[in-house]
Amino acid sequence: MAGVEDLDSGLESMNEGSKDLTPEKITAQLVESLDDDLDEDCEDETLSERLWGLTEMFPEGLRNKTHSLCKGSQNLVKTLYHYSRLSAWIFFSSSTILVAPIIFEIERCQMEEVQKYQQKQALLGPGVAPR
């Protein structure tokens, strides 16, 4: 039977360059080279470029109708926003002009009542019950 020294693992007979080529390293190098090739072939596209590329598969009439629908929706949203701002301004400014004098008048009446009560209390004494 051969001793431990007699068994050759095969590494001594390989030259220095081929010792680095283990199956794991070869697989990793192949995967890396494939990734590099894929990165070079695939250009980065934005979402809008991809969507624009997809429009070529639809008929011209459908594309025109879709475009006009999108523009119409955009104009509708702008118009609704404009009128909602305008109506909010009219509502709040009108309510301020119409309601503020009423609030001031109510506050003035309450202050007059408090002054009358304080005057009556000062003349007749602290034991007078309010009416």
Image (cartoon, rainbow, N blue to C red):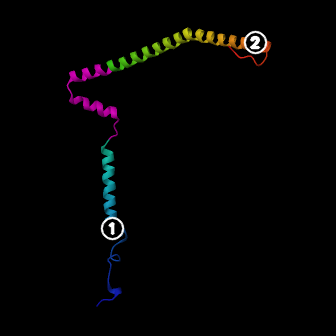
Determine whether the residue tagged by mark 2 lies in a helix, strand or loop.
helix
Circle 2 is placed at which residue position? 120
Determine whether the residue tagged by mark 1 lies in a helix, strand or loop.
loop
User: Which kind of residue does numbered mark 1 sit on?
Assistant: Thr
Query: Residue, x 33% and y 73% (percent of image)?
Result: 14
Circle 1 is placed at which residue position? 22
**Which tag, 1 or 2, sits closer to the chain's start?**
1
Q: Is residue 48 magenta?
A: yes
Q: Is residue 81 magenta?
A: no
Q: Is residue 11 left or right of residue 129?
A: left
* Percent of width and height locating residue 10: 32, 77
In front: 101, or 20?
Answer: 101
In front: 116, or 79?
Answer: 116
27 up-or-down from 66: above or below: below
Q: Which residue lies furthest to the left in this view?
A: 59
Residue 45: mark? none
* Percent of width and height locating residue 105: 62, 9
16 up-or-down from 114: above or below: below
Start and end of the magenta stretch?
A: 43-71
In front: 82, or 49?
Answer: 82
